[in-house]
Image (spheres, rainbow, N blue to C red):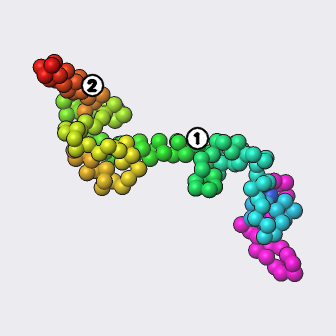
Amino acid sequence: MILNGVYMKKCKKCGDDLPNRVFVDGKMRNICKRKFCLKCSPFKKHNTSQYIAKKGHKVCTKCKKELPLKDFSRKGERLHSWCRSCLYLCQSEVDNKKKEKAVQYKGGKCIHCGYDKYYGALEFHHRNPSEKDVNFKKLRKRKWDEYKKELDKCDMVCSNCHSEIHHKIDMRRREERLKVS
């Protein structure tokens, strides 16, 4: 609603208009950033979360859905403000961007066959397995410089070529075992 040329927000619980300023305890208070009226959420009570969701539920700040508490991850002692689905989608986007950047860093195609149609089918093969960081998958969460150091130990190959490389390695190991015994 617009009153005297000023837009008035609505209370998220009851839908009443929210004025920008009101008298509370004999003082003029600026309440333009509030989401709930003073009837639904009394001044200085910090109790808005109970008006958003039923008991045992919480509203995800990303998707705005009311979900059971079990759908939220713990962040120390408290619950994360995003539901697990939103966290997963966000992390997937970040991971995909980092993978695209890594693929471009390594040349954008398989070094054996030249495949370059879909970056998701490109993989990183460590030339020397003993130099491989044990937590390579966890590197995705680290800074780009640390990620790059590990990528420098790798060749970029497509899924098919990567399978062939490991098949040859496995065959060599079997032959060596047979020779020893």
Label 1 vs 2, first from the N-terminus: 1
Front-lying residue, 134 or 159: 134
| Residue 72 relative to residue 22: left or right | left
* Above-or-below relation of 145 to 19: above
Residue 159 visible in this rendered orientation of the protein: yes
Residue farthest toward the bottom in the current orientation of the protein: 26
Residue corresponding to mark 1? 85
Amino acid at circle 1:
Ser
Q: Is residue 1 visible?
A: no
Q: Position of residue 42 (x, y in %)?
A: 83, 66
18 in magenta: yes
Image position of 11 (left or right of 86): right
- Within the magenta stretch, is there residue 155? no
Q: Residue at x 87, y 78 (%)?
A: 25
Picture residue at 78% right of the left edge, 47% below the top: 55
Q: Position of residue 172 (x, y in %)?
A: 16, 23
Mark 1: few/some/many CA within 10 Å (<14, 14-19, 20+): some
Quarter of the image for the C terminus: give it: top left
Q: Classify residue 31 as left or right of residue 173.
A: right
Residue 116: name its quadrant.
top left
Cβ atoms under marks 1 and 2 closer than 8 Å: no
Task: Tell me, for residue 163, which label it has, or none.
Answer: 2
Outermost residue toward the left in this view: 179
